[in-house]
Image (cartoon, helix red, strand yellow):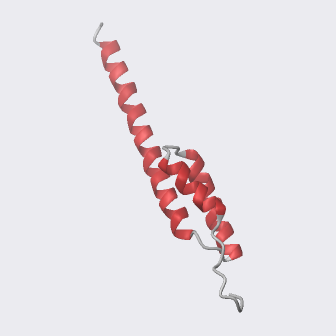
């Protein structure tokens, strides 16, 4: 911190990670979250918590999409085998 008491900058990718995860994207926040955490380690910027929250939401969203796809495929397979 300098003599003026300036706050450290927040990593922009961590903000983008959080926003894209809230919007329901899965892959984008996962990739950006890992990149932003690496940048934060290197630059000592703020935003690590936002990046982690975005990562968690992104992984949970991805899990939800995978479950929905699996259930949909199972429904189509079972209805197709029943002779409908």
Query: Which residue is pictured at 63% across the width and 80% down the height?
Result: 7
The single residue placed furthest to the bottom in the displayed view is 3
Residue 16, by quadrant, is bottom right
Q: Is residue 79 left or right of residue 19?
A: left
Residue at left offset 71%, top offset 74%: 43
Q: Nearer the viewer, residue 18 or 82?
A: 18
The vertical placement of 82 against 60, above or below, is above
Which residue sits furthest front?
4
Q: Position of residue 27 (x, y in %)?
A: 57, 46
Number of numbered discs visible in the structure rendering? 0
Q: Residue at x 28, y 12 (%)?
A: 82
Tell me which corner region of the image, top left, top right, bottom left or bottom right, holds residue 46. bottom right
Looking at the figure, which quarter contains the C terminus?
Answer: top left
Residue that sits furthest to the top in the current view: 83
Q: Please state the horizontal and vertical placement of residue 64, each as a whole percent of the image.
A: 40, 42
**Residue 38 x, y percent position in the rendering:** 66, 67
40 above or below 53? Answer: below
Query: Does 41 sit left or right of 52 as displayed?
Result: right
Relative depth, front residue between 41 and 70: 41
Of residue 11 and residue 41, the one placed in the foreground of this image is 11
Is 68 above or below relative to 74? below
Q: Quadrant of the N terminus?
A: bottom right
Q: Is 12 placed above or below 81 here?
A: below
Q: Residue at x 59, y 61 (%)?
A: 14
| Percent x, y of residue 76 | 36, 19
């Amino acid at each position: 911190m300098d003599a003026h008491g300036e706050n450290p900058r927040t990593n922009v990718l961590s903000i983008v990670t959080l926003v894209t995860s809230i919007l329901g994207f899965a892959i984008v926040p996962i990739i950006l979250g890992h990149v932003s955490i690496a940048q934060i380690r290197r630059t000592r910027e703020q935003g690590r918590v936002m990046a982690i929250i975005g990562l968690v939401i992104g992984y949970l969203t991805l899990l939800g999409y995978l479950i929905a796809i699996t259930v949909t495929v199972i429904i189509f397979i079972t209805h197709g085998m029943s002779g409908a």
